[in-house]
Amino acid sequence: MSAPHDLAIRGGTIVTASDRFRADIGVRGGRITDIAVSIEGAQEEIDATGLLVLPGGIDAHVHLAQPTSDGTVMADDFESGTRSAAAGGNTTVLPFAMQVKGTSLRDCVTAYHAKAEGKCYTDVSFHLIISDPTPQVLGQELPALVRDGYTSFKVFMTYDDLVLNDAELLAVFDVARREKALVMVHAEGHDAIKYMTARLESEGKTAPYYHAEAHHQVAEREATHRAISHAQLTDVPVMIVHVSGRDPMEQIQWAQKRGMKVHAETCPQYIVLTRDDLKGLNMDFEGAKYVCSPPPRDTDSQAAIWEGLRDGTFEVFSSDHCPFYYEGSGDTGKDNSRARTSFRWVPNGIPGVETRLPILFSEGVSKGRITLERFVALTSTNPAKLYGLYPQKGALLVGADADITLWDPTKVATIKQADLHHGSDYTPYEGMQITGWPVRTILRGQTIVQDGEVMADPGTGRYQTRGTSEAIGRAGVS
C-alpha cells in the first residue's frame, strides 16, 4: 500500500502573513494536502525541528536575459538567474519581457519564452515592458496579452530607449483600466536627470558617485507625483517600483491616505546601502559596482524606508536584480572604456536575487524591525496577491503549490561572491554579516536547493499564467 503523502515536513514552526504555529505539512502531487498536528505516512520525510517553515519567496522584480541598448551583456540568463534565486529561498521569480522599440510586443514575448524554455530552476512568470505604445500595441497586442495571463506591465519615465511621454503614459494607463491590468512604474524624471547629468559633466564631475547626484531624489519625487496623478485621472491601480527614499514615499502616502489605488515596492539596496557606497575607495571607479536607478540615498532615507516597510506603505519587497559583470569581457562590463569617461555610461543595475531574503530577514526580523509575519507578507504573500498568483503561490494552504522554504533563524553567515550562484562577478553586499538563512528550498514538493547545494536540474521550473491582480479593488492584500 502506497504512503498517503509524497512528502511530510515535520516539527517546524509554520509562519504565514498573519499567523505562526507548530504543525506538520503533508504534500502529494506537488500540492499541500494536509496541515495537521501530526502527519503520518510519507515517502519522504523532512525533520524541520528548530526551523521556520515559510512560503517560498516570490521575487516580483528581476531582470534576466534582457537586451540592452548599448550592447552590454547581462550577467544572468534564466538558468543562472533562477539557480541563484532558488539558492536564496525563492520558488518563483517575475522577470520582464521587454518590447524593443519598433518591434511587435507579441513577438518580443514569444522570443523571451524561448530564452526561458527548459532552463529554469524556479517557476517564472513574465511582466511586460511597453516601450513603443503604437496603435497596434495598444489596440490589439496588449489587450490580447493581458487576456492571455500577462496581467502586469511596466512603463518607464526615464531612459532614452524606454521613456514614455505623458500622453503615451495616459494611453497605456487607459488600456490597463479597460483590461484590468496592474501598471508598474519606474518613476524618475527624464528631463531632470538629463539636465543634472549635463551640468555635472560640464563641471568635470564624472566619477560613478555623481550618478547619485544626477538621479536626484527630487527627480524621483516629481515623477512619482506625476505617475500618481495620471493614475488618478485614468482610475487605474499602479505599482511604484523600487522606491528609494522619504520624498517619493511621502507622495505615495499622500495618495494612499486619499484612497487612491497606489501600491509601492522597495528593495534591499535602499535599506543597507547609501550613496556614499558609490564613492568606492576615495571616489574611484569601484563605486560603479553600486550604480543602479534610483540610486541608494542617505541614512534618513533608510530610516524612512523602514517606516514604510512596517506601516504598510510598501506592500512588496523585491530585489530589482539587474545583474551586470563588473569586469566582463570584451569591454562589456560596468568597467568599460566608455563608462570610464562618465557615470552616464555605467551599466545601470546590481545583482541581488539571491541575497534579497537573507538581507531583509537579518536586518528586519533578526534585528526586531519587522515581524516574521510581515516578512512573509512582503516577500511572498503580497507579491502573489498583487500579481495574480494567489492562492496557488505565496501561501501555505491546503491545495496550494508546495512551494516551501525552510529557514534557520539562528544561522550566521557572511555574504561572499565566492558562495553565490548568480552569473555576475561581484556582489554589492560583499562581507555583510547575516543572521538567519534559508537552508532548504522546495518547489512543488521537490527540494531544489539544500544547504547551498543545487539539487534539481534546469527545467524543473514552469511558466505560470497569472490571473487578475488583487490590486483591482485592493481586496485581500496583507
Image (tube, rainbow, N blue to C red):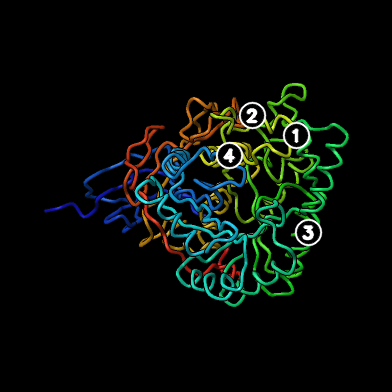
Q: Which of marks 3 and 4 is nearer the N terminus?
A: 4
User: Compared to 329, does 184 lie above or below?
Assistant: below
Tell me the kind of residue under disc 1: Ser
User: Residue 63 location in percent, x, y?
Assistant: 54, 47
User: Residue 37 location in percent, x, y?
Assistant: 35, 52
What residue is at 33 percent from the left and 37 percent from the top?
Answer: 455
The reply to whether residue 473 is visible in this rendering is no
State if disc 4 and disc 3 touch (CB < 8 Å): no
Tell me the kind of residue under disc 2: Asp
Which residue is identified by label 4? 72
Q: How far apart are marks 3 and 2 (CA)?
A: 35 Å
Q: Which of marks 4 and 2 is nearer the N terminus?
A: 4
Q: Distance between the residues labelled 2 and 1?
A: 11 Å
Q: Distance between the residues labelled 3 and 4?
A: 34 Å
Tell me the kind of residue under disc 4: Thr
What residue is at 31 percent from the left and 50 percent from the top?
Answer: 38
Mark on residue 251?
3
Q: Earlier in the sequence, mark 3 or mark 2?
A: 3
Q: Residues within 10 Å of mark 3 (few under 14, many from 20)?
A: some
User: Residue 333 location in percent, x, y?
Assistant: 59, 32
Mark 3 against mark 2, which lies toward the viewer? 2
Q: Distance between the residues labelled 4 and 2?
A: 11 Å
* Viewport quadrant of the C terminus: bottom right
Mark 2 element type:
loop
Q: Which of marks 4 and 1 is nearer the N terminus?
A: 4
Which residue is identified by label 1? 342
Which residue is identified by label 2? 335
The quadrant holding residue 179 is bottom right
Q: Which of marks 2 and 1 is nearer the N terminus?
A: 2
Mark 4 element type:
loop
